Image (cartoon, rainbow, N blue to C red):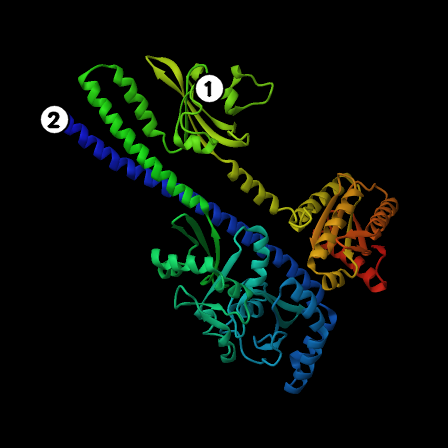
Amino acid sequence: MRHILAIILFALLSCLAFFGYTKTHMLEERDALLERQNQILETSYKTVTHMYKVSIESYFKYIILNQGVLNILHKAKEANIEEKAILRGSLYRLLYPIYNNDLKNLGVRQLHFHTPKGESFLRFHKPSENGDPLFDIRPSIKIANIDKVFISGFEGGRIYPGFRYVFPIIDKGEHLGSVEISLPYESIELELSKLLTCKNHIFLMKKSITTNLVFDSHKEYFMPSSFSDEFVIENQKISSISEKSIKSPMVDTINTLIKQKYDIEKLLLSGKNFSTPIVDGNEGYIANFHAIYDTSNALAAYAVTYGDMEELVSLEKKYLITNFMGCLIIFLFSFGIYLYLKQNKKILLEKIQFETIVRTTVNGILLLNTDGKIRFMNLAACKILGYEVGEVEGKNSHELIHVHDTSYDQEHCHILSSIKSQKAYVGEEIFRKKNGDKITVLVNANSFIQNDKSIGSVTIFRDITQEKKNQERIEHLAYYDALTDLPNRKLLLNRLSLSIKESSRNLDFGGLLFIDLDKFKRLNDTHGHYMGDKLLQEVALRLQGQLRTCDTVSRFGGDEFIILLTKLGKDEINAKEELYKIAKKLLHAIALPYQLPNLEYICTASIGGTLFINDDETVDDILKNADAAMYEVKKEGKNEIKIF
């Protein structure tokens, strides 16, 4: 009787311990899923903001530092009120076409000039509002004008908050003030949506950088958030993101569940990134909260993405089944101990088998004989591979499940070799599912020992196919353009930097061609961005088809392409002629008719080029030279080539 009570107590304690063990592993597995989501969001966010920074720096160099703009700012520095009003109008007329077209197409919402004393000189988004002091409410403007350094980051303002890029303006040693180019979150979200599967977003902003700062006339553009009185969102009048999310049943469902299951206000005020996984019946959801800090490193906002996450439902169901199987195994194991004490030593083997299953029941498990035949496959393994319980027992695992190269016979199988060597094997292998699909699994195979003799193998495996695909996709997106699959700006700049060093070392000229499609905007305006995207893809294919494998074709941004050419020879005249010939060939290829959907289209291009051989020239110098040559073509009528 005492033994029975001890066994019952052991079984109950084992079940409690097993429940704690499986719950811990379920939370770890869930946290790993959430961490991957946060890493993808973090990587995508950094990629998008860096892309905008590079683009905006280019606009500052070539547009804001224009001599006409600088002349106006020189005069404005010493002008009286009436003269400043006239100069403000001149500056507005000079830059408004660029602001209304190029900058808005880039996603810019605010172009704002400030005086050296930190007062608003001209807001292109609100020209009537000027003259108000900004140092006390806009640290970025104070830094740009006092320290005279560039600064970027998210920040509130008197009209709109935004992602700010603030540049000091200095000409001939004289400080003329600063200029700010700002993006709304819609612009960031537009690019994020190309990288992420989540299609609903909301942007939570603290009151301290929004309604507490803006002019009274702009308070109406903000509305309370559904999570906390400390945060607001832009309303539907100025934010398409808010309008879409407010109308989304899924977002409404997730928000309701978050408020029921989490202390959301406490999480928001923590200032850290976090995710809120939700399982509601047979539906799984996730909301990722990405913390955004302002230029003074204080919490300013959260970028929130909403999406479905079916893995959460599968994870919960898997662990419910695991707990059931674990309890069953524990009680069977306990019964085995009782029989062992009462009858014979044969139950000892069953005890060892049950203990092994209990320890390893979280992932897929295969128990194999020495000849590779399957003795047992657990429920998790059946689910991963698509088999019914008991369907594959007695069959050869090497022929049925484990996929090898045709020349790789069963004798050299890593899993089966571990049985003979009695050494553990850990590595990636290919398994075949019942429907024929192949998956990548992480395998841990251990020899099953009895009386110092190997009698089979315990093989534990986990499906890592999607993890590998996600990692490869993220790595690819970091260096290649999503639309054309050409190298992007970052990869081009890396290759150009290496080519400069190689040309200098070998005294062999390299070349750069800057290609801008003529009248591309007209195609977008007339036939829509879909046609524009199709044209860019066709142009990319033609450019690739005309060049050597050692050359690089890059989409630099918008309708701009850059060609990096190497090994043009050691003679400058011949190298320049060769560069011109290549440019001529590309110009001809671009000009051939395009068969777009329901449209035959003729496109021309303006091409500027430059040579390089000396590493005294920087990447920026070479890009600037090629860009300047291209702009000369634009001025002289387009559809031509100019080599500097």
Who's the residue at 52% across and 32% down the image? 440
- Determine whether the residue tagged by mark 2 lies in a helix, strand or loop: helix
Residue type at mark 1: give it.
Answer: Lys
Query: Which residue, given by chain and number where applicable, does mark 1 sit on?
Result: 395
Most extreme residue toward the bottom is: 82
Residue 305, can we see it?
yes
Query: Which residue, given by chain and number where applicable, does mark 2 sit on?
Result: 2
Q: Give the vertical position of 343 relative to 529 (above or below).
A: above
* Location of residue 229 (image quadrant): bottom left
**For marks 2 and 1 on the same chain, the one whose residue lies earlier in the sequence:** 2
Foreground residue among 25 and 112: 25
- Determine whether the residue tagged by mark 1 lies in a helix, strand or loop: loop
Q: Say left or right for 151 vs 12.
A: right
Most extreme residue toward the left is: 1
Foreground residue among 348 and 120: 348
Q: Give the vertical position of 603 relative to 100 (above or below).
A: above
Q: Say left or right for 584 vs 555.
A: right
Residue 227, position in %: x, y?
A: 40, 63
Residue 33, position in %: x, y?
A: 44, 44
Within-10-Å neighbours for mark 1: few <14, some 14–19, many 20+: some
Residue 632, position in %: x, y?
A: 82, 61
* Location of residue 71 (image quadrant): bottom right
The quadrant the N terminus occupies is top left
Rounded to the nearest angstrom, the CA distance separating label 2 from label 1 is 44 Å
Residue type at mark 2: give it.
Answer: Arg
